[in-house]
Each structure stands twice: as C-alpha cells, then as structure tokens.
Image (tube, coloured by chain):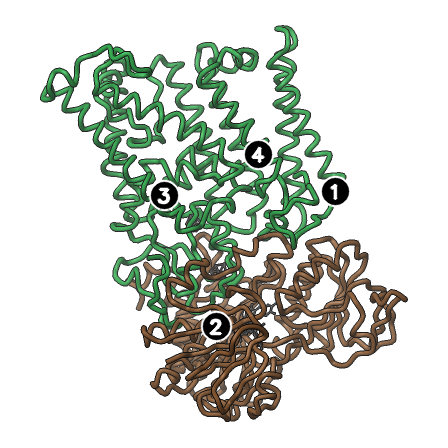
Amino acid sequence: MHLVIIGNGIAGVSCAQTVRRLQPEARITLVSSESPHHFSRPALMYLYMGHMRWEDVKPHADWYWPENRLELVHYHATAIDVEKRLVHLAAGPPLAYDALLLATGATTRYADWPGQQLSGVQGLVSKADVELMAATTPGVQQAVVVGGGLIGVELAEMLHARRIPVTVLVRDAHYWGSVLPPEEAALVDAEFRRHGVLVQYRTELAELLGDEGGRVQAVRTSTGQELPAQWVGIATGVQPNLSLAQSAGLDTDRGVLVDELLQTSVPGIYAAGDCAQRRQPPPGEAAIEPLWYTGRMQGETVAHTICGQLTPYRRGPWFNSAKFFDLEYQTYGVVPPRPVEGQASFWWQPARGHCGLRLHYRLDDNLTLLGLNALGLRLRHAVCDGWLRQGVSVRHALEHLGEANFDPEFFPQHEEAVLAAFNQQNPTLLPLVLRRRKGLLTRLFST
Amino acid sequence: MTTISSFPAQPLAHPTPATAPAERSWLALVALGLLALLVTAAAPAGLRGPAFWLGIALLSAGTLGWSWWKFGQGPAGVRHNFLWARSSTARGAVAWMTGIVLTGFYVVLYWWPQYLENLIRPLDGLSQTLRHRPADQWFLYGTFYTLAVLLMGARALYKYRHSPYQRIRTGSVMFFQLGFSWLLPGLLLALQKPEFYFSYFWPLKYDYLFPGTVDYLVRDGRALGVFMVFWGAVMSLVATPVLTYFFGKRWYCSWVCGCGALAETAGDQYRHLSDKSRTAWRWEVRLIYPILGFIVLVTALLWLGAAGVLPGWFTSPHSSGLPLVDGVSPLEGLSKVYGFFIGSIFSGVIGVGAYPLMGARVWCRFGCPMAAYLGLLQKHFSRFRISTNGGQCISCGNCSNVCEMGIDVKQYAQRGEPIIRAACVGCGLCSTACPRGVLNLENGPREGRYQASPLISAESLRILE
Ligand SMILES: Cc1cc2nc3c(=O)[nH]c(=O)nc-3n(C[C@H](O)[C@H](O)[C@H](O)COP(=O)(O)OP(=O)(O)OC[C@H]3O[C@@H](n4cnc5c(N)ncnc54)[C@H](O)[C@@H]3O)c2cc1C
Ligand code: SF4
Ligand code: SF4
C-alpha cells in the first residue's frame, strides 16, 4: 500500500507513525510545502522570543524519518486526480496513492476588514508567519492584537518580550468569553495587567488604516477609537485549508466533510486534524476541533481505518491546556462559560495567590462531575479522565482531590481549603472529608 | 548580557531588545569588580589588599543587584527570553571569551599558581581566622567557588522564586557548599584534624576509599579519622543506594554535590547548551561507564596491593622515564593517571571551562563516576521517575531545551512515557519550564514505574534505538 499524506503537521505525522506500526511494509509519503520536517506549531512563539531554535521545536530528529522509512516531499500539492488516484505536485512527477490523507491544517481567518491587506497586518499560524513577524516588528512603537483567544495572548506575550507596547482587542465582555467563566477570565485579566498589557473588552476591529507606503499605521475600533499601531496581529480564529479538497470535488463546508471514520465523500481519501469537519459530531462536541491533541487522536484513529481496522473517531472526555503569560490553565470535561439549567459550578480561589479551581457538576442525585478548570494548579490527566468516564460525584472528586494534584513537590496543597470552602457553600449537604492526599505514595494508605 | 545584533544563532529572535540603562549599570559593577581583581593580580603589595576586596565587593554587589533587577522585580515566572539569541548564552563571542577565561583560570591554578600569589595573599586574614593557617591557591579556589555558588544561587532564587522545589533545592546546594565544602573543612584544619569533605564520596572523591587515605585518616585523625573513614564508606556503599532508592540520583547531584551546586547556580544560564542529539548520548555512555569501571578497578587493585596479593613488579616503583608516572609503581601510576586526566583535567579544566559552550554539566554527564554509579542505581533500583501528564504534551521542546543533562525529555513526554534515565539529576527544570504542566518528579511504588499513559497511544517506533 502506498499512503500519501498531505500535510506534515501533528495529524499527518501521527497517522504516518501509526500506519508504520500497524503495517510495517507500507510505503508512506508525507507531503508538505511549509517545512521539510514536522515541527510543533504551538512552539512557534518560543522561536520569536529566543527560547529555542528551529531544531529545538522539531519533535523528532532528522534521522527519524529515513530510519522509519517515512518519505518526505517538500513541495506543494497542487491537485488531486481522483480518477487516476494521483497527487500532482508543484514540481516533480505526480504521486500515485492507494490511500490519501488530507491533513492540510488551517490558516488565519480574516473577516474582510478594510485595510487587512496592509503590510504589518498578519496572523500567526505558520512558520512563514513567525518569520514575517520577526521581519516586520523591529522598530514598531505600538502594536494591536485582535482577538481574545489563545493565539491572541501568545501574540501579546511575544510582543511584550520585545518590549513593544501592545493593546489587545476582545469582542466579549471578558477574556475568551466563549470558553471561560468570568472568574477564570478575571484571573487571566489580572495576568494581562501584571504584565502591563492593555486589554479593551467589548471592542472589535472595524478598519485598518495605512500610510502611503502601504504599511499599517492605526486601527479603528468598533467603539470609534483610533489606536496607532504599526503592527497588527489577527487572532480571531483559523479556517481550514480547503482549496485542494474543493478543486478535487470533495464535499466541503467550513472544513473537509468527514464521517465518523474520518472518510471524505470520495472513497480512499480521508481527512484529519484542523482541516476536517465532522458531518455529525456527537452532541456537545464541535464539528471542527482545531487542537494539537485532537489532531494527534484523529491521525491515530484514521490510521487504523486506513489499515483496514475500521475505527470511528471517539476522543473521550475533552481536555486542553494553555498558558497565559505565567498562568497555566488546564481543563477536563465540560465547563460551560455561563450557568446552565440543572447544573452547578463550584469555584474556589484563595484569598491571596494567583490560582483557582472549578468543579462543574450536574444537579442530579449523584451530583455527577461534568468538568474541571484549573488555573495556576496542575491536575493529573489520568485521574480527571477516569472520574469523568466513570461519572463520579463531585463529592467523590473533592474528597479524593489529592489524587488529582499534579503540582511539583513542596508546592502548597490546597485540598483542605477547597473542601472547607465547598462545605461552607453547601451547608445542607453532608460535610466532605478529605480522603486522599497528594502523591503517588499515599495511594497505598488511602481509603 | 551583551548583545550582538547580527549574531546568527536564532535569527527570528533578532534584534534583541537593547539592554536597559539600569541593567547596564549593574553589569558595569560586575565588570569593574573583575577589573579590580585583574589589577590585584599585578598590583604592588600595598595596593593588592584594597583592590582585591574592592573587586570582591563590586562583583558581589553587581551580581546581586543585576539578579534582582533582572529576575527579582516584576512578576515571577519562567524567563528564557532571548537565551538562544544573546552572544553570552548562545555560543557567541562573549561565550567563547568566558570559556577561555575560565579555562585559563584553571590552567593557572593547577600548574602556575605562583601567578595567583597576589590574589591569595589578601585571603590570609580570612584563612587564619577560619583555618589557623595562611591561604594557599586551594583556599582561593574554594573561596571563589563558594562565592560563585552563593551569588549565582541568589540569582537562581530570584529567578525561580515561583517554584518551591527550585527554591528549596537551590537553598540546599548553597548550604552544602558553604557549610560542608568551605567552613567545615577549614574548621577541621583549625582543630588540627585532617581536612575532610563530608559531602563528597567515593567514587567522585576517589581517594576517600583508597588504602592510603584510610591509613592517613586513621593515623592523623584518630577517633575522628576513624569516623571519617566510616562515614565515607557508609555514604558510598550504604547511604547512596538507600537514598537513591527512595529519592533518585537527585538527592546528591542537584541537592548536595558541589559540582552540582556550581552547575545549578553559576551554570543555570547555560543549561540549554547541552547537546540533546543521539550522538551525544552515545558519547555519554561510551565515556562515563568506562570511567566508573576504571576507578572501581584502580580502587580494588590498590586494596589488593595493600593486602600484598599482587605481583611485586606491579606494586614496586620503576623509573620509566615517562611523564607523570616516572618513579612510581604501575599501580600508583594508574591512580595518578586517573587523578590527572579525570580528577583534574576533565572535572575542572574542561568541566567548568566548557560551561558557556556545552552547558554546565559536561563533567556530570560525560565524566563523573559518582553520577554513573548513581545513574545505574536510579535506572534499576529506584522509586524515582518523572511522570508525564496523560496526553497534555504539545511537543513544544521546552523541557528538552532546559535539560542540562542533555536528555531529550520531550521524546518521552510526547509518547506519554515516564522519564527514567540514568543521567537525570532531578534538577526539576523540565517540570518548571513545561508550559502545559506535563512533567512531575515523583517517588512512588516501583510497580508500573515504566508504564505509559493510556491517554496517548505510544507508537512503538524506534524513537531512540
Ligand atoms: C500559534 C499557535 C499556537 C497553538 N497552540 C496550541 C496549543 O497550545 N494547544 C493545542 O492543542 N493546539 C494549539 N494550536 C493548534 C494546533 O497547533 C493545531 O491544531 C495543529 O497543529 C493542527 O495540526 P494539523 O496536522 O491538522 O495541521 P497543520 O499543523 O496545520 O499541518 C498542515 C500542514 O499541511 C501543509 N499543507 C497544506 N496544504 C498543503 C498542500 N496543498 N501541499 C503541501 N502542503 C500543504 C501546511 O503547510 C501545513 O504544514 C496552536 C496553533 C497555533 C497556530
Ligand atoms: S513535556 Fe511540556 S515542555 Fe516538554 S514538549 Fe511536552 S509540553 Fe513541551
Ligand atoms: S530530565 Fe528534567 S529533572 Fe532530569 S536533569 Fe533533565 S531537566 Fe533536570
């Protein structure tokens, strides 16, 4: 079998690795025009800030690919001949495939703002983006970042490292309003302020203004302000790379449409990662999941199907993590940003100290745990995942909170305080007793 | 520190922001301090005392002030901006110069100490007070070394103040360096006892289990000497396996050891320079275990020699005309060769001289027999591991970048596997630097120690052979 994968991001590479394991004799070719080797997209910011070099953000050393017989083609794929099962490349002979995976990822989404083509206006998704940013930010006096999501805060941190004053425009009333409840957002906002980054909430980009040279000079906001800016970062989201799929006649919507086996509308062609859109996602799950983790899981899943072990994509309880300047964030399961009928949330935050913990649960007899948010605290993924899969009660989770504590040694332990707060807020419930402290050792002594 | 804007190591991070005036003034103090010490080295007798102490004062004030300015004010967190872009920390001209100066200092110290006379004499007063005897080049060295650990330890405390693990660990290496490697040996001398380092053990301090040393300690130190021999033997042969079983190699390498102390404090800014490649790993294995084997063999032979069971030609002196070993027995020759090439050149000259180019753990990683011994214990008989947190790794590479032992930590993390490597000194920096909270140093039951997370399906590919 010859498997051709377009895109050497995490989805494409995870699929290649899994197929190599399942079918040691398969021929596997990875095509990418972005970079010869796979790299960690979430690490792009560290290149700009000088934490690491290019070779440090490659998850595998260069010898890895030939040693595992993964062929790399560093050309753009220009067209797919569905009939003849050929992929045409920008140079060189076409590639004949038996199976084809589209893992083409995504690019910055622009909302048709007037002036968005000015130089100094860009997003941050690709290697070329970070190179452009390095070339266009020197000498910038003021910068504006549009978008209150994860890439927005990364851009702010990058500019801050260069001591470029930056203002972040956020559409919602608080940071990452579509995901974070207000308490979490307030902690993130405090983090912005601690680092001297200005954030304007309830503000959107209306227009970009340039000089005669075609370089951006200022932005006009939806609130009518004009903010001077010689560099503007667009971080309002990404959109799947579709052109290849569209020109080949595959069914597409916002992304390449796939069924639960991640097959596209054409037999033998699959899609995974940022570019894939599920036709019928299970309730509560998004059709497009543009994350590193989901890209990895989709890549592994589709590899099984390609190798004949039909495997539907089931990602299990949601999880994600991020870092807002110095504040780490982890989330497990479902934590809605706003109150939901029939569900309740318990939020704990110490009087002093920059952290917080939320346990979200259903108001049934069991008080079933639905999700957790942690800021400035590390939680043990395996434990949270187990709780969510088993549908344990929030009472069980709290009494065994130590089990989920993944903070390093000697860090303050908050379990007692968290329990006390819960007992105080729920005087009608039977008081909780801490049954599990932190650490691997206590597993032996716990009840 | 200094920035050279055309420096190529990390083009995307250029140009680095200009150094702020306040930072420049603190660095100027450091430079003036170094200048004063240089002047001391060539100054006439009357001037050298004041110049020396002025130099030390400026150096200390400058280092402390700079550390506070750079890391102590403002929010605490991982601060690695422009590490790979500055000439001083990215193998640029400044780094090369620093390396040459450090190497030069060791060469002069070992082979031409007479040129350090002017730096040694001002320490006479201190040495008399502490040790009841005049200073010598080793007292100068020990004092500089301890000062470096304390000053740069303060920098590490500022820099990592958000992490209790790093705070306590840094405090520990500072305590052991000052107390056990500087004050206590001096005090023993003052009390007419053998100079003894209670925090160094065989096979790092290889001669502590040599018959000659045992003899001398028992003879000169009497009851205390017997205790020293007992201490050395118990620490090497009993306490080391037991402590390593419970806590891993780190209890020594990044909490107690003086080499570790310098690496973790003065060398902190160079930790990313350690080579993470497979080739480097192969060299590590090729060097460190034979060195351990060599010193174990020499120790065993010395004891056999002392017991009189070795052939006479092996234990009696020969005049071979060879440098270093002329006029000694082949047996003693072996121990001399080890002492010269491994004990002096490797651990000192190369070990510290290479800090700004290859990271601070060159000796610990490629040479130290104690690290090899601890590493074998850690790998096979220990409850220590670095756990990875389910599927949370984003393969960003920060952990591998900061690993001073050159371990490619992300290879394990991105497959959801615990990190159990002989080399790991448990500095905890990978855990501190990981932006996704993936890594955690833990001691726990040995069952399932190697078990990978089911939340990541580990592809059974050949990652590292
Ligand atoms: C700045 C930034 C930070 C992020 N941080 C996080 C994070 O912290 N956590 C997290 O979970 N996710 C994060 N993400 C999201 C995550 O990086 C993506 O979800 C993930 O990389 C998607 O992987 P993929 O394999 O689907 O696609 P990609 O990684 O985008 O790979 C697709 C590749 O295909 C190539 N390609 C496309 N079309 C063609 C063609 N026709 N011919 C040849 N090559 C082609 C593209 O150039 C690209 O190299 C971040 C994203 C960005 C941009
Ligand atoms: S373990 Fe952490 S630091 Fe290391 S690659 Fe994974 S996310 Fe990055
Ligand atoms: S693996 Fe982590 S704890 Fe071990 S030496 Fe490397 S950075 Fe330190």
Marks 3 and 2 close (CB-CB < 8 Å): no
Nearer to us: label 3 or label 1: 3
Q: Secondary structure at mark 1?
A: loop
Q: Amino acid at mark 1?
A: Ala
Marks 1 and 2 close (CB-CB < 8 Å): no
Q: Chain of mark 4?
A: B
Distance CA(mark 3)–CA(mark 4): 23 Å
Near-viewer residue (A156 or B200) = A156
* Disc nearer the start of the sequence (3/1): 1
Q: Is residue B273 toward the left or the right of residue B216 in the image?
A: right
- Is residue A286 at least partly visible in the picture? no
Nearer to us: label 4 or label 2: 2
Q: Are marks 3 and 4 on the same chain?
A: yes
User: According to the image, label 2 marks what residue?
Assistant: A30
Q: Amino acid at mark 3?
A: Trp
Q: Are marks 3 and 1 on the same chain?
A: yes
Instruction: Give the colour in which the image draws chain B.
Output: green
User: According to the image, label 4 marks what residue?
Assistant: B96
Q: Amino acid at mark 2?
A: Leu
Q: Chain of mark 2?
A: A
Instruction: Give the colour in which the image draws chain A.
Output: brown
* Rendering coords of residue A128 (x, y %): 65, 65
Asked if disc 2 is less than 8 Å from ligand 1, the answer is no
Asked if disc 1 is less than 8 Å from ligand 1, the answer is no
